[in-house]
Image (cartoon, rainbow, N blue to C red):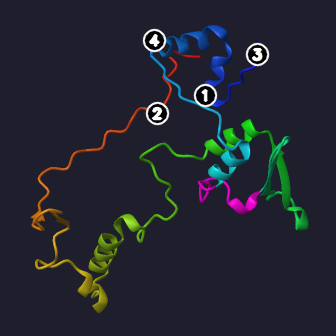
């Protein structure tokens, strides 16, 4: 008893009754879990996960070791002054994975590293609108890139080579990834 710890908005779940009420709808679901031992052991799992750390939570170069004590990695203490900023930390495998997975986004989401006027999502339209408002003539190379009527169609039939026309775009339906919310005040 008392082994589970809850933080933030979930602190109310520390009460056994509240936790039991929260679990009730989950018990009605049929859960199928498929898990098996890794073929090559924990080191292979860490190697696999390290390939997916690029720009997520920790870079490969910061991972130092995986042994019976846990995962060792480098981190930077911004409060420290001088040469003591760079430090090493070792966490148990479970705690390391918990912290790492806090940085992994659900399917369908993406990180926004660059935003504003020249973000990739709307760069061309934003710059065109800014030029229009500033009454600036576009650069010659951008005029060439502008779409024209004789351009190749975006989608071509792989069988006959004829252009394909978009009739309707269906919205993407994302799976529910959050646990049920607590009912009432905690």
Q: Nearer the viewer, mark 3 or mark 1?
A: 3
Measured in 3D between alpha carbons, the distance from the residue under mark 4 to the one under mark 3, in whole angstroms, is 25 Å
Query: Image height check: is 146 above or below 63?
Result: below
Measured in 3D between alpha carbons, the distance from the residue under mark 1 to the one under mark 2, in whole angstroms, is 17 Å
SS assignment at label 1 = helix
Q: Earlier in the sequence, mark 4 or mark 2?
A: 4
Magenta stretch in the rendered image: 51-63
Residue named by callout 2: 177
Measured in 3D between alpha carbons, the distance from the residue under mark 4 to the one under mark 2, in whole angstroms, is 17 Å
Q: Earlier in the sequence, mark 1 or mark 4?
A: 1
Q: Earlier in the sequence, mark 4 or mark 3?
A: 3
Q: Earlier in the sequence, mark 3 or mark 1?
A: 3
Residue named by callout 4: 28
Q: Earlier in the sequence, mark 1 or mark 2?
A: 1
Residue named by callout 1: 9
For residue 2, the mark is 3
Q: Are marks 1 and 4 in contact (CB under 8 Å)?
A: no
SS assignment at label 3 = loop
* Residue 24 seen in this snapshot: yes
Q: Quadrant for residue 62, please give it.
A: bottom right
Q: Is residue 123 left or right of residue 59?
A: left
Q: Nearer the viewer, mark 4 or mark 3?
A: 4
Can residue 54 be found in the magenta stretch?
A: yes
Query: Image height check: is 49 above or below 119?
Result: above
Q: Are marks 2 and 3 in contact (CB under 8 Å)?
A: no
């Amino acid at each position: 008893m008392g082994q589970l710890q809850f933080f933030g908005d979930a602190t109310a779940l520390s009460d056994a009754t509240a936790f039991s009420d929260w679990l009730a709808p989950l018990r009605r679901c049929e859960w199928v879990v498929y898990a098996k031992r890794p073929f090559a052991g924990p080191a292979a799992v860490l190697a696999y996960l390290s390939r997916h750390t690029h720009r997520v939570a920790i870079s490969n170069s910061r991972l130092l070791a995986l042994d019976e004590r846990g995962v060792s990695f480098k981190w930077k203490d911004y409060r420290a002054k001088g040469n003591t900023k760079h430090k090493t930390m070792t966490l148990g495998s479970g705690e390391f994975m918990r912290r790492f997975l806090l940085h992994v986004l659900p399917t369908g989401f993406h990180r926004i590293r660059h935003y504003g006027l020249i973000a990739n999502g709307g760069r061309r339209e934003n710059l065109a609108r800014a030029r229009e408002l500033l009454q600036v003539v576009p650069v010659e190379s951008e005029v060439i890139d502008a779409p024209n009527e004789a351009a190749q169609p975006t989608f071509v039939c792989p069988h006959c080579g004829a252009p394909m026309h978009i009739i309707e775009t269906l919205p993407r339906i994302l799976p529910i990834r959050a646990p049920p919310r607590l009912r009432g005040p905690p």
